[in-house]
Image: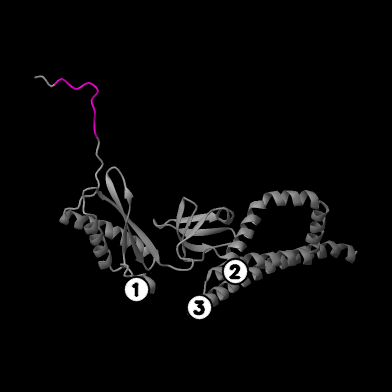
């Protein structure tokens, strides 16, 4: 009688013990995940600052640590709890159907993970780089995760792009190997304007700007090339097309340089009587209007 009475109670206690064990494993996994993220983040952030190394792959590993830790926790729970072990065996019995369903449902997720790993290995860009993804998205890379890349655009908005999308797009990286940029200052002056004087004005205004740097090589200096080259690119029906090549230390300085030069050059042109090209329209009347009063 005693054995029959306490048998079911022992079963209930055992079930509660399994539940408690699973909860403890998940709590421990959560705490370990927080500790690992903190330690990895702090260590690699300090190393990146001291050694001037790329923090991209370290951020990626930090974001991936939670996934790996909870995956291990789930394996431990399924292997340690008998009822879940039986449930796992039941699932394996229908492995063909399950694999098809899971494969179809998680195809996009696994594709993003694989693409994220390739982004870290081949490094077309890093955290902090200024990039243009395709023809639509431009900004600074803020974070790289297992699923997506976060880009902060110039309006301070965050653009979240899946890794698979980025892997299939053309990437323009302004800071991959060298942050210096060459800004094209393009202007059209009237055909009657003095080309030589216009070129001198553009060079003087560019050289005065604090963001303009001298990027000439030793050979170019020996040849006597100007720090800012201004070339005649062609002629149209209305204008002489000029292009100045002004260098800046980074894209931010280059943007400011271009905007400021467009204004200062226009003001100098106005002072010295150099006209910008103005579109003209000729109207021809098929039947001249009657001018008789």
**Label 1 secondary element:** helix
Q: CA distance from mark 2 to mark 1?
A: 50 Å
Q: For residue 61, which numbered disc appears in the image?
A: 2
Within 10 angstroms of label 3, few (less than 14), some, or many (20 or more) residues?
A: few
Question: Mark 3 highlights which residue?
Answer: 46
Q: For residue 14, which numbered disc appears in the image?
A: none
91 left or right, relative to 103: right
Q: Which residues are magenta?
A: 282-290
Instruction: State which tag comes first along the sequence, 3 or 1.
Output: 3
Residue 63 visible in image: no
Cβ atoms under marks 3 and 1 closer than 8 Å: no
Residue 10 is a magenta residue:
no
Residue 266 screen position, x and y as percent: 22, 55
Quick one: which residue is furthest to the right in this view?
A: 1
Within 10 angstroms of label 1, few (less than 14), some, or many (20 or more) residues?
A: few
**Label 3 secondary element:** helix
Q: CA distance from mark 3 to mark 1?
A: 44 Å
């Amino acid at each position: 009688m005693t054995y029959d009475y306490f048998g079911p109670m022992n079963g209930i206690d055992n079930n509660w013990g399994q539940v408690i064990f699973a909860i403890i494993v998940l709590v421990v996994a959560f705490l370990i995940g927080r500790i690992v993220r903190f330690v990895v983040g702090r260590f690699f952030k300090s190393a990146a600052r001291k050694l001037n190394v790329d923090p991209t792959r370290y951020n990626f590993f930090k974001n991936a640590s939670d996934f790996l830790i909870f995956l291990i926790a789930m394996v431990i729970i399924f292997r340690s709890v008998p009822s879940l072990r039986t449930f796992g065996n039941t699932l394996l019995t229908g492995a063909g159907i399950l694999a098809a369903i899971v494969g179809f449902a998680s195809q996009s997720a696994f594709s993003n993970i694989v693409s994220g790993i390739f982004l870290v290995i081949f490094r077309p860009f890093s955290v902090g780089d200024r990039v243009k993804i395709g023809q639509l998205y431009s900004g600074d890379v803020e974070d790289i995760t297992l699923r997506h890349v976060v880009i902060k655009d110039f309006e301070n908005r965050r653009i979240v792009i899946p890794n698979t999308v980025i892997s299939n797009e053309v990437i323009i990286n302004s800071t991959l190997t060298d942050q210096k940029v060459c800004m094209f200052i393009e202007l059209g002056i009237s055909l009657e304007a003095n080309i030589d004087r216009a070129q001198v004005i553009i060079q003087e205004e560019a050289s005065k700007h604090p963001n303009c740097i001298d990027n000439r090589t030793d050979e170019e200096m020996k040849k006597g090339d100007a720090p800012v080259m201004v070339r005649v690119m062609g002629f149209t029906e209305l204008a002489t097309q000029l292009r100045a090549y002004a260098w800046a230390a980074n894209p931010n300085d280059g943007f400011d340089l271009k905007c400021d030069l467009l204004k200062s050059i226009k003001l100098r042109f106005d002072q010295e009587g150099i006209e910008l090209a103005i579109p003209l329209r000729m109207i021809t009347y098929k039947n001249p209007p009657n001018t008789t009063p």
